Image (cartoon, rainbow, N blue to C red):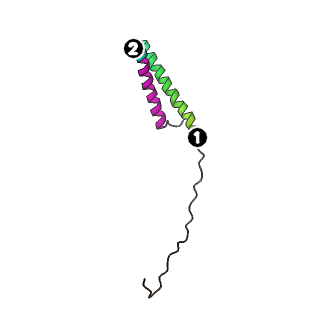
Amino acid sequence: MPHPTPAQIIYGSVTVVTTTFALLLIAPALSGPGLALVAGVALLLGVLVALVLRARHTGRVPAARPLKTAQPQPVDTPRRRPGVTV
């Protein structure tokens, strides 16, 4: 199983924090089970965002191409002639 990319971790974490904050603003007076539900919903939404990002990312990866090695080209350099100064 491939490791998550930094973008997936960031987007998932931001989604969890934002969702938790928004849900707590909507329903501020929650009991223990209500807070657990908010945390669970936010966590599931964060995982969903990370998985959707991975699905979008894997569809755009180009195939690996073999590297072409550059062939050395001869260099034209002026030749020194003995006894001639420039």
Q: Amino acid at mark 1?
A: Arg
- For label 2, count other residues whose C-alpha is less than 10 Å away and answer few (under 14), some (14-19) or many (20+): few
* Element on which disc 1 rests: loop
* Relative height, residue 74 to residue 79 (above, below): above
* Relative height, residue 79 to residue 1 (above, below): below
Query: Residue 68: x and y, percent?
Result: 58, 58
* Relative height, residue 14 to residue 29 (above, below): below
| Of 80 and 1, the residue lying toward us | 80
- For label 1, count other residues whose C-alpha is less than 10 Å away and answer few (under 14), some (14-19) or many (20+): few
Q: What residue appears at the point 48 percent right and 20 percent down from the top-left corner?
A: 41
Q: How many marks?
A: 2
Q: Amino acid at mark 2?
A: Pro
Q: Is residue 48 left or right of residue 21?
A: right
* Relative height, residue 52 to residue 75 (above, below): above
- State how far apart marks 2 and 1 are (Cα): 42 Å
Q: Which residue is mark 1?
A: 60
* Element on which disc 2 rests: loop
Q: Earlier in the sequence, mark 2 or mark 1?
A: 2
Q: Is residue 18 left or right of residue 72?
A: left
Q: What residue appears at the point 42 percent right and 14 percent down from the top-left corner?
A: 27
| Of 47 and 1, the residue lying toward us | 47
Q: What residue appears at the point 51 percent right and 31 percent down from the top-left corner?
A: 50
Which region of the structure is painted magenta? 1-24
Quadrant (top left, top right, bottom left, bottom right) of the C terminus? bottom left
Tell which residue pokes out farthest to the front in this image. 86
Membership of 13 in magenta stretch: yes
Q: What residue appears at the point 49 percent right and 78 percent down from the top-left corner?
A: 78
Magenta span: helix, strand or loop, mainly? helix
Q: Which mark is residue 28?
A: 2
